[in-house]
Image: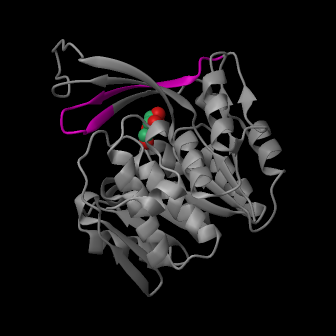
Amino acid sequence: MRILDFGSLNIDYVYQVDHMVRPGETLAAGRRDVFPGGKGLNQAVACARAGAEVWQAGMVGPEGDLLLDVCKKAGVNTDLVARTDVATGHTVIQVDRGGQNCILLYGGANRQIDEAYADDVLAHFSPGDYVILQNEISCLPHIVDEAARRGLKVILNPSPYNDALDAVDMSKVSLFLLNEVEGAQVSGGSTDPDEILARLGEKYPDSAVVLTLGSAGSRYQKGAERHEQGIYHVKAVDTTAAGDTFTGYFVWAMSVGKPVPEALDLAARASAIAVTRAGAVPSIPTMDEVLAAKL
Ligand code: RIB
């Protein structure tokens, strides 16, 4: 069983700000850092740092070497990543004094993915392998269809949530990992976690769901099976990639057959550590760090 992360690779330009810039306002940033990121790359690195053998697929532009180097250093196989002349995806991220962020995303090379490339990538994988997807690349509906047709387990983090997801056949998703905002959007409006889970359970009865709820922790549901996990309290420096860290650790734990409560706990520990550190990829802990942390 192998794990393929088919997703975005971004260069994150991260600005420390007193508050999020308001409409019409010009705001001086305290500092700027440039970090590797992208939900796809972050989740692949989190899987690898948890201990998985993981492949990254996606596209980068001429300035994408930095991202490939980061993957390789983390132990993520990049043989399937393709090149294009279009600029590498990037973001402008504001991080305020409380560690909260807001993200402006330019898709760039991530939006050049087409059916031919997707088919070529997926042909390397076999029934039972996992594919982790997010919503920062083009061709997502086709990738879901083709991955399911080939017997891969489709794991979807429907983030960022937008209309492009309407074309995805969500009934082919084995595991959803989503936060309460995305949960409300996927399930049709309610912000109540019980209602979100009930609605998702009705719509996708064969799928497992992990719903993350910020300070209220996370919940798992598959059929009648239910689990809850609290958070570890830490001082937040930067929440960027905390959700990606949770996803990578949870998927790794599932892939090696850990019981769900243990998988949720490991994911909560790893994401708690991630919020104490700046940046996306640099914030993702290794399994040794997760196991050693006094949380
Ligand atoms: O989830 C965090 C990520 O979202 C950042 O690394 C940024 O690139 C955006 O994709």
Q: Which residues make up the magenta segment? A: 86-102
* Magenta residue check for 202: no
Identity of the residue drawn at 44% across and 60% down = 292
Q: In the rendered view, tell whether residue 233 sits above or below residue 120.
A: below
Residue 166 horizontal side relative to residue 193, left or right? right
Q: In the rendered view, tell whether residue 137 sits above or below residue 227.
A: above
* Residue 129, percent from left and from top: 73, 63
- Residue found at the far bottom of this picture: 224
Judging depth in this view, the residue of 290 and 18 nearest the camera is 290
Residue 234 horizontal side relative to residue 144, left or right? left
Residue 95 horizontal side relative to residue 248, left or right? left
Q: Quadrant of ligand 1?
A: top left
Q: In the rendered view, tell whether residue 233 sits above or below residue 34.
A: below
Residue 173 visible somewhere in the drawing: no
* Residue 180, percent from left and from top: 31, 59
Identity of the residue drawn at 53% across and 80% down = 259
Identity of the residue drawn at 59% across and 62% down = 252
Image quarter (top left, top right, bottom left or bottom right) of the C terminus: bottom left
Q: Quadrant of residue 63?
A: top right
Q: In the rendered view, tell whether residue 20 sits above or below residue 54.
A: above
Q: Quadrant of residue 230?
A: bottom left
Image quarter (top left, top right, bottom left or bottom right) of the N terminus: bottom right
Q: What's the coloring here?
A: one colour
Judging depth in this view, the residue of 58 and 243 nearest the camera is 243
* Residue 272, percent from left and from top: 35, 55
